[in-house]
Image (tube, rainbow, N blue to C red):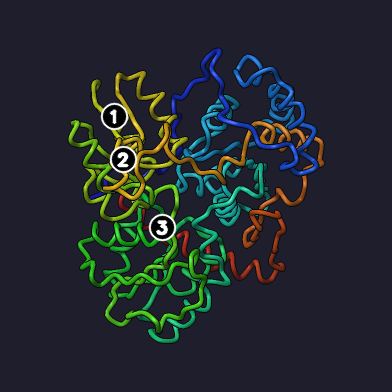
Amino acid sequence: MHSSRDISLTPRPTGITLQSDIPICQGDLPLDWYQDEFAPYAEEYLALPDRTPESVIPWLDSYVKPALDYFGDSLLLLAHYYMGGEIVKLVEKYGGKVADSYALALQASQNPEKKVIVESAVHFMAETIATLANDDQQVWITNPKAGCTMEMMAKDWMVLPVAEELIAKYGDDLLVIAYMNTSGRIKAIAGQTGGAVCTSSNAPLIVEWARKQGKKILFVPDEHLGRNTAVKCSMDISRVCTLGDPHTYGVTWTADDFDTDAAEMICWGGYCGVHTIFTPEQVRWWKEKDWQVIIHPESKLEAVQEANGSGSTAYLWNTVMEAPKGSKFAVGTEGHFVRNLQEQAAVNGIEVMHLAEAKVDQDSATSGSVTSGGCGCATMSRNDPPHLAGMLDLLRKGNAPDINRVLAGDVVNEQTAKRQRLSGDERTIMVANAKLALERMIEITEASA
């Protein structure tokens, strides 16, 4: 049975507040990194005397408030928990919503009156929102180069040949489960095979659903979430096969190079660099000091098994915020999220530290000691105040760059911002299959709530 901590069906206010005289921005991007259309906003931002609310908010107000007045109730601002504190705080300040990937995916379909949706997070999340959006809703991303390193390890041109090989070999006995951290093109493969999308919050539900059908599962792209979910579902871990590491070796292998016949679950070899830094030694270091350790299931199985609990960002946030005063938690996930949680938990008398700040002997753990705050998602942090101000101002003026518009099926190069866009017919087919996979996920998840 999955508790309400595991699954976030709707966004909820984080409670994070802007504090006077304290910088709300961790760092600045170089000016030449911005799109030409956003450079004037970045120049103004970089010329501010500091990054405190006293300086940033009046400047932001000059762009955001006119946009809010212009669009009214038709505008929806969104951000993910992993965004740096400045964007989470600012999006909520201006009436937007902050959530995990599952709740974000539902925002367009659940709010049909919102016609202009502006997302400050990564591209696959905006694309998922666009896949479920109505025809009269537009989805925009503040920075199209905000990608996901895990998604980059499972591009459609990498996965499709291997998936086709496995489908040819096992036929209808195989289905694909696509993690939310994939493009719409990968989600479409799940839909085509009778599979479903999953998130870290509902992965056990989706895998259990597939197992009840007696299906062999191709789980894309995160091998660690796949392995942790298999254990949570009481699957024999020896029957979990992991394919090659696409980041280190490229996809120079075929499925025949691995023993897939004996496998109940076949995991693509992708991973999140933010979460693979965590080790069993770090977990034990905190537990020996009587701290509770909770960790994201994109982490390695060995670390997750040592922890007191594991789950999605909604699980991590809710577990801490619902704990009694005086509780102490070491949290293993993205650094910006932990800093935001640490700040808000302190209001309730709860101590929070980043798991990677364990003072572990480097000879006994591969990661060693990590500097304050742990590892943040660098690509997600490519969304910053100038991007938010510029996006809303350009939309209000009718001059928003087309590259920031997100349609289902779009693939954007995270370095160059060069986009591949499907034709109308191609997009129609892809959306139909990706929607099947997403709707199966929603049906299974909400039936369990």
Is label 1 in a helix, a strand or a loop? loop
Q: Mark 2: few, some, or many residues within 10 Å (few <14, many ≥20)?
A: some
Is label 2 in a helix, a strand or a loop? loop
Amino acid type, residue under disc 2 in the picture: Arg
Q: Mark 3: few, some, or many residues within 10 Å (few <14, many ≥20)?
A: many
Q: Earlier in the sequence, mark 3 or mark 2?
A: 2
Q: Which residue is mark 1?
A: 322
Q: Which residue is mark 2?
A: 5
Whether residue 446 is visible, yes or no, is: no
Instruction: Using the numbered discs, state the Cα–Cα distance from disc 3 to disc 1 in whole angstroms.
Output: 25 Å
Image location (x, y in percent) of residue 285:
23, 38
Quadrant assignment, res 341:
top left
Q: Identify the mark at residue 198; answer none if there is no mark.
A: 3
Q: Earlier in the sequence, mark 3 or mark 1?
A: 3
Amino acid type, residue under disc 1 in the picture: Glu
Q: Earlier in the sequence, mark 2 or mark 1?
A: 2
| On screen, residue 91 above or below 251 | above
Instruction: Using the numbered discs, state the Cα–Cα distance from disc 3 to disc 2 in whole angstroms.
Output: 16 Å
Is label 3 in a helix, a strand or a loop? strand
Instruction: Using the numbered discs, state the Cα–Cα distance from disc 2 to disc 1 in whole angstroms.
Output: 9 Å
Q: Identify the mark at residue 139; answer none if there is no mark.
A: none
Circles 3 and 1 in contact, beta carbons < 8 Å? no
Image location (x, y in percent) of residue 95:
57, 28
- Horizontal placement of 332 versus 190: left or right? left
| On screen, residue 172 above or below 118 | below
Q: Mark 1: few, some, or many residues within 10 Å (few <14, many ≥20)?
A: few
Image location (x, y in percent) of residue 415:
66, 54
What residue is shown at x 35% (from left), y 21% (from top)?
Answer: 346
Amino acid type, residue under disc 3 in the picture: Cys
Return the residue nearer the eye: 59 or 140: 59
Image location (x, y in percent) of residue 169:
40, 86
Circles 2 and 1 in contact, beta carbons < 8 Å? yes
